Image (cartoon, coloured by chain):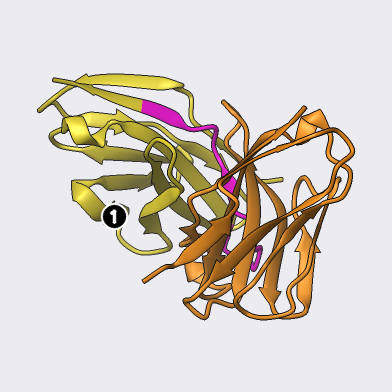
Chain colours: A orange, B yellow
Amino acid sequence: NAGVTQTPKFRILKIGQSMTLQCTQDMNHNYMYWYRQDPGMGLKLIYYSVGAGITDKGEVPNGYNVSRSTTEDFPLRLELAAPSQTSVYFCASSSSGGPLAGELFFGEGSRLTVL
Amino acid sequence: AQSVAQPEDQVNVAEGNPLTVKCTYSVSGNPYLFWYVQYPNRGLQFLLKYITGDNLVKGSYGFEAEFNKSQTSFHLKKPSALVSDSALYFCAARSGAGSYQLTFGKGTKLSVIP
C-alpha cells in the first residue's frame, strides 16, 4: 500500500541546473498538488491538478513547471535552480474536489538544496 | 484571500495534562477546516476535519477540535497528552465554495514533557 511516492528524497543542485521531482500515487486520486515547506512558513501551494491533462498555478508557481499526462504521475520541474528554491517539497493527492479535497495524502518529501 | 493563523510557535505540556493548539481562520463563505500532524522527516498526516454539523469533531489518536464560528477559531484539543503526541501541528482551511487551494498555518510545535 504505497500511497504517494516521491523521488528523490534528497538532492543538491548548483545554481542554474535543472531537475525533475517525481511523484506518483496508486490510489486513483484525480487531484494532485505540489507544496513547498520552508521553516516557520507553513506550506505553500506551487501547482495543482484536477485530472490528467489539467494543471493550474497555486500561490508560488514562479520557477516551476508541471505536467499531468496520467492519473498516477505529477512531476515537478525546476528549470533554472536558484537558492530561493532550497526547500522541502511535498506532493499530495486527494480523491475529489468537494469536501474531501482538504483530506490530503502526502508523500514523505523531497529535500532540495541549491548552492 | 484565505488566511490561517496559529498564534503559538511552540506549546509545551506535561504528559497526562490536557493540551490545546490554537487556530484562527479567515475564508470567504463557509469554511472547511482541517488539522494535520507532521512527525520529523515525514509528510503531513490528516488528523480531523470540520465540514458542517456538530461543532466538536473527533479525529485520530484521541484528538478533537472545536469549531467556533463567531470567533473564527478551530482549536485542536486532547484530554490527556502523550509523549508520542510531540510533533508539528498544522491547521488548514479552504472555502467551501469550490476552491481547491488549501491554506496552511505556519505550524505549532507541540512538546509533551514526561
Quarter of the C terminus of chain B within the rendering: top left
| Number of marks in picture | 1
Residue at 45% over, 37% down: B71
- State the extent of the magenta-drawn residues as a range: B95-109
Tell me, yes or no, if residue B28 can be seen here: no
Q: Which of B104 and B40 is in front in this view?
A: B40
Q: B11 left or right of A99?
A: left
Q: Name the image quarter holding residue B58.
A: bottom left
Location of mark 1 (residue): B57
Tell me, yes or no, if residue B57 can be seen here: yes
Residue at 36% over, 71% down: A1
Q: A101 left or right of B76?
A: right
Q: Is residue B79 magenta?
A: no
Main secondary-structure element of the magenta-colored stretch: loop
Q: Is residue B105 magenta?
A: yes
> How many residues crowd mark 1 within 10 Å: few (<14), some (14–19), many (20+)?
some
